[in-house]
Amino acid sequence: MGNPQCLADATTGRMTAFATKLREQGRSTATVARHLRHLQVIFRWAKRQGYLQTVPTVEIPKQQKGMRGRPITLEEFERMIVSVPKAVGELAADSFRFYLQGLWTSGLRLEESLALRWDEAPGAIVVELGGRRPMLRIPAEAEKGGTHRLLPITPEFAELLATIPEDERSGRVFKLLTKAGQLAKPSRHSIGPRVGAIGRAAGVVTDQREKKGEIVKEFASAHDLRRAFGFRWSRRVMPTILRELMRHADITTTMRYYVGVNAEATADELWAAVEGKTGTTLGTIEAAEEKQDSKTSSF
């Protein structure tokens, strides 16, 4: 696509490609929106001054009210994996790498992941690998919706669980350690901040806002890994299946937070296919098609 050289280069397609690039760089929704709002003001001024004939359409992304964070990318996840020892220490590193991989491939909430076990216990979510398909058995007291259910395990999560030798499949699935190498307390208040520390060490910013004149940054959390899971699978399965995977009580939640974002990502890819990667415009595509048609008709 190349960098715009003059105001006439500021087309709707280029603005869409610019927003896509910002997301690929891991910028938060708030940051992307702020950049686009500034450009929108500049374009309107240029139109009033006669420098632009047409103001390009700039779609400002909207962040859901009360929603913080965003799905992290694969590159950001890999940075978190690399940053684990820096955040939690060498003795705990392997346990937290496995834990992050578990959150990435399962979509479990923080509390659910800490309740995941190989065997029965009060309030446990039990792994069942012996059936036709791997499942999680979730009792009503451990389920946010208060309903006893079986939850299918994604193939990637099943493969991760299968790496644990059978003679070690007892107790909690995620046996997290402290910096001293001791078993950590399986509490959201102790484990959640440590996942956040890994996100900070990796420099993965998932949200930022202005507060009292200062920019406050939030770093990748366990829930952002769940969001990443939901986003990836929203591109693979239908909304009703995704709702079951995410265990949403209402499919409206699935549609609002994942399917809508999925539609925006699809639109970004469509625009990138036309302009973002090759510099091709709709006009050149039509010209190429007409040229091909004329060649075909000559035979």
Image: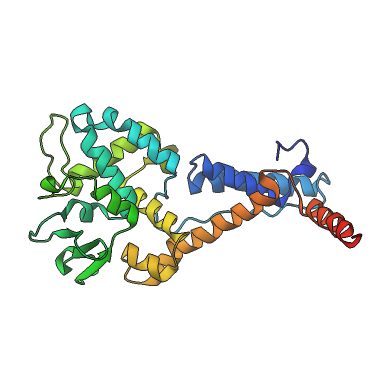
The residue located at (21%, 72%) in the rendering is: 147
Question: Of 290 and 144, which appears nearest the observer?
Answer: 290
Colour pattern:
rainbow
User: Where on the picture, by quarter, is residue 297?
Assistant: bottom right
The residue located at (38%, 68%) in the rendering is: 241
Counting the numbered discs, the total is: 0
Question: Of 222 and 92, which appears nearest the observer?
Answer: 92
Residue farthest along the front direction in this orientation: 299
Report x, y in % for residue 94.
23, 35
Report x, y in % for residue 78.
39, 37
Q: Is residue 141 above or below residue 127?
A: below
- One can see residue 25 in this view: yes
Report x, y in % for residue 70.
42, 50
Look at the image and tell me in which quarter the C terminus lies.
bottom right
- One can see residue 211 in this view: no
Question: Of 53 and 72, which appears nearest the observer?
Answer: 72
User: Where on the picture, by quarter, is residue 76?
Assistant: top left
User: Where on the picture, by quarter, is residue 138?
Assistant: bottom left
Q: Answer left or right for 206 relative to 280.
A: left
Question: Of 111 and 292, which appears nearest the observer?
Answer: 292
Q: Is residue 298 above or below residue 9?
A: below
Residue farthest along the left direction in this orientation: 121
Look at the image and tell me in which quarter the N terminus lies.
top right
Report x, y in % for residue 97.
27, 38
The residue located at (31%, 36%) in the rendering is: 198
